[in-house]
Image: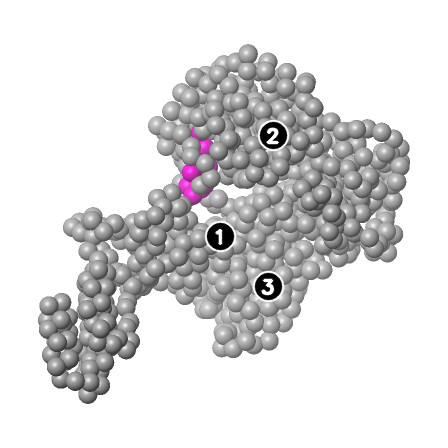
Amino acid sequence: MMRHTIAVLVKDHPGVLARVASLFTRRGFNIESLAVGHTEEKNISRMTIVVEGDERALEQITKQLNKLIDVIRVRDVSPYNSVERELALIKVNTTSLPIRSEIMQIVDIFRAKVVDVDSQIMTMETTGTEDKVNAFIELLRPFGLKEIVRTGKIALSRGTILSQTLKGVDTKN
Amino acid sequence: MSDMKLTGAQIVVECLKKEEVRVIFGIPGGAIMPLYDVLYSETSIKHILTRHEQGAAHAADGYARATGNVGVCIATSGPGATNLVTGLANAYLDSIPLVAFTGQVSTNLIGTDAFQEVDINGITLPITKNNYVVREVRDLASIIQEAFYIARTGRPGPVLIDLPKDVQLAQTEFKYPEKVNLNRYKPTFSGHIQQIKAAAQEISKAKKPVIYAGGGVISSNASSELRDLAFQANIPVTTTLMGLGTFPETHPLSLGMLGMHGTTYANYAISAADLIIALGVRFDDRVTGKLSEFGSQAKIIHIDIDPAEVGKNILVDIPIVGDVKNILKKLNEHVNEKRETEWLKIIADWKSKYPLKYKSNGELKPQYIIEKIYEITKGEAIIVTDVGQHQMWAAQYYQYTQPRTFISSGGLGTMGYGLPAAIGTKIGCPDKTVICISGDGSFQMNIQELATAINNNLAIIVVIMNNGYLGMVRQWQELFFDRRYAATSLAGSPDFAKLTEVYGGIGIRVTKKEDFYPALKKALSLNTFVLIDCLIPQEENVLPMVAPGAAITKMMGVD
């Protein structure tokens, strides 16, 4: 079983997320993460979906996705030719001063940011690959994690591979 | 017309006229009343009131299969809409073009659990090719045009349009777009020429070729191209249940149906073949049996309009995505005349050694009934079936020679399909003899449509194979569950002939073999709705049979 990152360009319609997500469920895929947002083109959204599955199952899901009328394009964005990022916000217990400075060192190493702080907690922000975010969280764990929120992974192909994606697509329909 | 404002309901009707819809099936209710009010004074569209929305969906489906046109059905919101669900799923699995309109509560009430509100779009998401909630009346005309286009093109299928009540009442200028503007939906139509040439080459090399034809050949009206290919290269043809009629079963090259209840020779032939030419099929488990042994000796050419079907269940050697008719036309240009005498002889031997057969004693056997129906109609009737044993007998013992003459629920296996589908068929083809073959179990699942058929003076003949059981389940209980007939007895069923009389039709009950033929003859002469209830032996089985999951050469009932 391999993990795949799939980029799906869709018509920005109400219900399109349900349409795409339910297809994965029906074909027996568990969506590990899902991020949706607008693209450079009006009325077109981009979904980045991370799933685990073998090649044949993935081929089938890609074909099924392509059959949805609201789906414009589907791409398997494999990690070796794409840039991937995740964003995480991590809230940690910080009751004493020495702990805070220790945390600050970790934040520096990871080039993360402190975005909120008071006498009880500190909240950090980090972006990076999934591995980097995981490593950052693991280093903070001993201090007592209060809350974590992670976005799904987003990914873009490197270089010019996907730059022509939306050319020729009628964005009105 | 162009500068006049119309209501949403009027726009729906104008669009139906633009799409040349002549007949629609449905039931009114609160949220769809504005549309019905417009239909009330519309003379060019005939509305058939069914007695249950499931009946409306199946009738539209039967109409679509018999005529090749898009079937249209209408229901109100809530329960009306959910009652369409089985019919939509049925059409979806058999790739039948339908457009369903459902009423919906007004847009300001959507999401409030208003009276008769359901999220029918959410419910039908996985069983429609596409669906819409129309929120703005100005989008209505283009949505309807798009829906019809999507339903009938590519791999056909059902499309649902949910119409909130206020959208039906809102006004806008009516303008029907000149053509569909849908860039993101472009089904592949012509096959890849290199692939077609490669296929032709394989055909010329093959020593034991078999054509395996399915419902896609009917959808693309490719029967004559299929026949050209088979005759040109003398290739035996087997069809799926959905493909019955694409190739004349009276021709020596016909192998009949393959699969679980297929002919022995079809299953032997496809298993021994060195080349399988699969046309508009999807390698369904009822056809292939154990996948690893299906066509294991063969190279496979798969021609289908849906790229997702290629390689879904089985790996193929030469996939060609596109319209079967279009591709076969080109393929036939590259296929040379040939005749594999040895292969045809092997097949002829199998045919004479393992014909379809049943024990004919003095009893009224279901197979005999089908043979007589074939004899009297000379194979020119349209046979509509329900689902179960009678369906398989109807597939086995009637010889289909024309496409769109066998109308049956294949993929979903919907009991209750037969009678409403026969209604749609008869309305679509009023000059054809329409015979609905049903069972005592299936028939009771949409028995209320007797009123629809009889009230519309539809001269349909219903033949019920009445064995007092949910026969196919009973057969499986006999074979795989040690004859423990759990909940399959249908004791308590009414006298169907008498019941038909109560509805105003003609009912005949047949208990003896010798009475069936005269009864059928009489029914055909009456030109009205006639039901013939045939009491058949209770434990008659459909044979031959392949156990689920077994290789299709492992057939029971073959000696």
Q: Is residue B504 above or below residue B539?
A: below
Secondary structure under the numbered disc 1 in the rendered image: loop
Q: Amino acid at mark 3?
A: Ala
Chain part drawn in magenta:
B301-311
Q: Is residue B443 visible?
A: no
Secondary structure under the numbered disc 3 in the rendered image: helix
Give the left or right position of residue B62, taking residue A46 as reference: right
* Residue B39, quarter of picture: bottom right
The residue tagged 3 is: B81
Q: Foreground residue, A4 or B126?
A: A4
Circle nearer the N terminus (3, 2): 3
Give the left or right position of residue A104, taking residue B210 as reference: left
- x, y percent for residue B321: 41, 37
Alpha-carbon span between mark 1 and mark 2:
37 Å
The residue tagged 2 is: B554
Q: Is residue B292 above or below residue A2?
A: above
